[in-house]
Image (tube, rainbow, N blue to C red):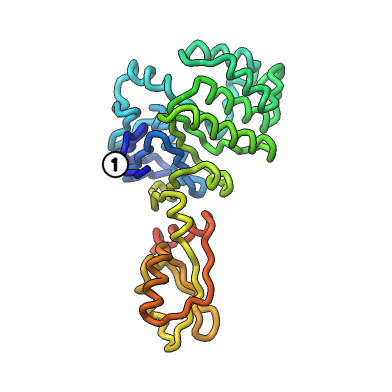
Amino acid sequence: MNLESGEAVLSFDDIRYENKNFKLGPLSLLVPEGCIMAIVGPNGSGKSTLFRMALNLIKPDQGGIALFGKELLIQDEDHLLKQHIGYLAEESSSQDNGLKAAEKARFHAFWYKNWDQAYYLRLLDELAIDSKLPLGKMSKGMRRKYEFALAIAHHPKLLLLDEPSSGLDPLAWKTMIKLLHQHMEEGESRSILMSSHIIEEVKRLADYIVFMADGQVLGIFEKDDLFSSWFSMFVKLEDGHSSKLHEMPGYCTIEHASGNTYRVTTGNALEAERWCGERGYAILSKQSLELDEIMSELMKGLKR
């Protein structure tokens, strides 16, 4: 799917937000229908702030936010729109610590008309959740699994997942990945916006990857294009004039390796290879970059 085509389930249009310790934007972002978009970035990038804005918990100082094509303005309409959203916050609320799972589920069932009790109970079973425990007595991992079940049990059109795998053991993580794939397969119009520090999680789930830092979007990429484009290459120059490598397509950084050999990082590997071939520069080896390495390169560009 082309990011520029189709319907956007969530859009941020030139938003700005600032408080004493943080500045977000100017920032524009579209979450397309039927896709999973993952936001990657260091702590303090603004990921959680975006989620809270989507829920109308924080108002931007400038710009507009729309859910399912409707601008977030009126509270009554806001409630109807939220019927179609599932939200997993990064941190659990201490206000719910005294509740048991069934009590919290009854509260959700009251507010969400599409609440599926049978599906909720199946989630408890698949995720091995001890629903007899008060929420405050659950381990971090079990509490996370329970809140994930709450977020998805009403079959939302849009899931907002803020670091969903935080505290999960490997088995629970694999189960969560499976359930998210099933969720997307059961409805063509469903979408997920998530944040994650887990590289493998992003690789397994995301269709699009958004890099954020310091309240700004550094880049939005289709996942397969991203990993086929970003490489480090060891290039040998017979004349040793390394300054010419700055003209390489997608050039980001250059390091001297040895002799006339340089390690060059590019975000446009196909064109970079063609460019080197046309000039007779030998590419001795190349290696694709991981998400954290791409993030580092983009942040270097932000600081330049």
Please state the horizontal and vertical placement of residue 239, each as a whole percent of the image: 42, 89
Residue 22 on image: x %, y %: 42, 44
Q: Is residue 4 left or right of residue 202?
A: left
In the displayed structure, does residue 116 sit left or right of residue 76?
Answer: right
Name the image quarter holding residue 83. Answer: top left
Residue 122, image x, y percentages: 63, 20
The residue at 39%/31% (across/down) is 54
Q: Nearer the viewer, residue 185 or 292?
A: 185
Q: How many marks?
A: 1
- Answer with the quarter of the image where residue 268 lies: bottom left
In this view, 222 is above or below 52: below
Q: Position of residue 37 (x, y in %)?
A: 44, 41
User: In the visual, does 23 lie left or right of 71?
Assistant: right
Which quadrant holds the N terminus? top left
Q: In what quadrant of the picture does the C terminus appear?
A: bottom left
Residue nearer the viewer, 198 or 204: 204
Task: Please determine whether, in this image, residue 227 is positioned above or below residue 176.
Answer: below
Looking at the image, residue 61 lies above or below residue 72:
below
Residue density around tag 1, few if under 14, some if 14–19, many if 20 or more, within 10 Å:
some
Q: Which residue is mark 1?
A: 14
Who's the residue at 53% across and 45% down the image? 202
For mark 1, give the secondary structure.
strand
Residue at coordinates 63% horizontally, 14% vertically from top-left?
Answer: 102
Residue positioned 46% across, 52% down in the render: 224
In the displayed image of the protein, which residue is found farthest to the bottom?
239
The amino acid beneath tag 1 is: Asp
